[in-house]
Amino acid sequence: MNFHQLIRQREVLLQQARLANMAYAYHHLCAHAERIANARLQGLVELRPCDPIAGQPWPRLVALEGSQSVIEEYFVDEQLGELADILGFLGEGIPEDGLRFRLEELGAWLLPVIRRELASAGVVLADGETSFHDRGRQQA
């Protein structure tokens, strides 16, 4: 592949990179939503950004309802960093004062948006790969 060929393919490569990141986000948010549902975690939480100056190198998930120790049992630092990165990629970055949401609604909030974008680009999910939100709707 030569330089000029890369320049000509730039737009396609950028679109493919975005779709790959959307697929990654979808896959990981499905896993988070499933873990949340299986553990029956619920309640209002706040995802706070990292603050290296204050000695907090990772984002932090704070229980505003329920037990903080349960949250800490189910989410390790790397998972919270990944969640923060995904939210940033989706345009739902973490404000300095934190991002509040209901833990049990994480999948229903974000997965349909990602699924629509993937579908509009012609991306077909693998057999049996549906979002947690879709599975819950099918069982109802």
Image (cartoon, rainbow, N blue to C red):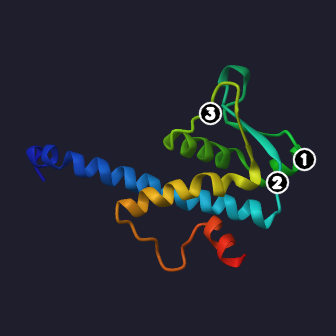
Instruction: Give the residue at x 59% y 66%.
Output: 131
Task: Answer with left or right where residue 7 lies relative to residue 138.
Answer: left
Q: Give the mark, 2 or 3, whose residue is nearer the N terminus.
A: 2
Q: Give the mark, 3 or 1, whose residue is nearer the N terminus.
A: 1
- Where is mark 1, residue-wise? 66
SS label for mark 3 = loop
Of residue 25 and residue 51, the one placed in the foreground of this image is: 25
Of residue 16 and residue 101, the one placed in the foreground of this image is: 101
Which x, y percent locates residue 124?
Answer: 41, 71
Between marks 3 and 1, how big is the CA–CA gap?
21 Å
- Where is mark 2, residue-wise? 42
Question: Which disc, if any, is residue 119?
Answer: none
Please tell me how crowded label 2 is: few (under 14), some (14-19), or many (20+) other residues with Cα within 10 Å.
Answer: some
Question: Which disc, if any, is residue 94?
Answer: 3
Query: Are the residues flagged by discs 1 and 2 in contact, CB closer than 8 Å?
Result: yes
Of residue 11 and residue 113, the one placed in the foreground of this image is: 113
Q: Height in image: 27 above or below 64?
A: below
Of residue 139 and residue 94, the one placed in the foreground of this image is: 139
Between marks 1 and 2, how big is the CA–CA gap?
8 Å
Specify the amino acid type for callout 1.
Gly
Please tell me how crowded label 1 is: few (under 14), some (14-19), or many (20+) other residues with Cα within 10 Å.
Answer: some
Specify the amino acid type for callout 3.
Ile
Q: Give the mark, 1 or 2, whose residue is nearer the N terminus.
A: 2
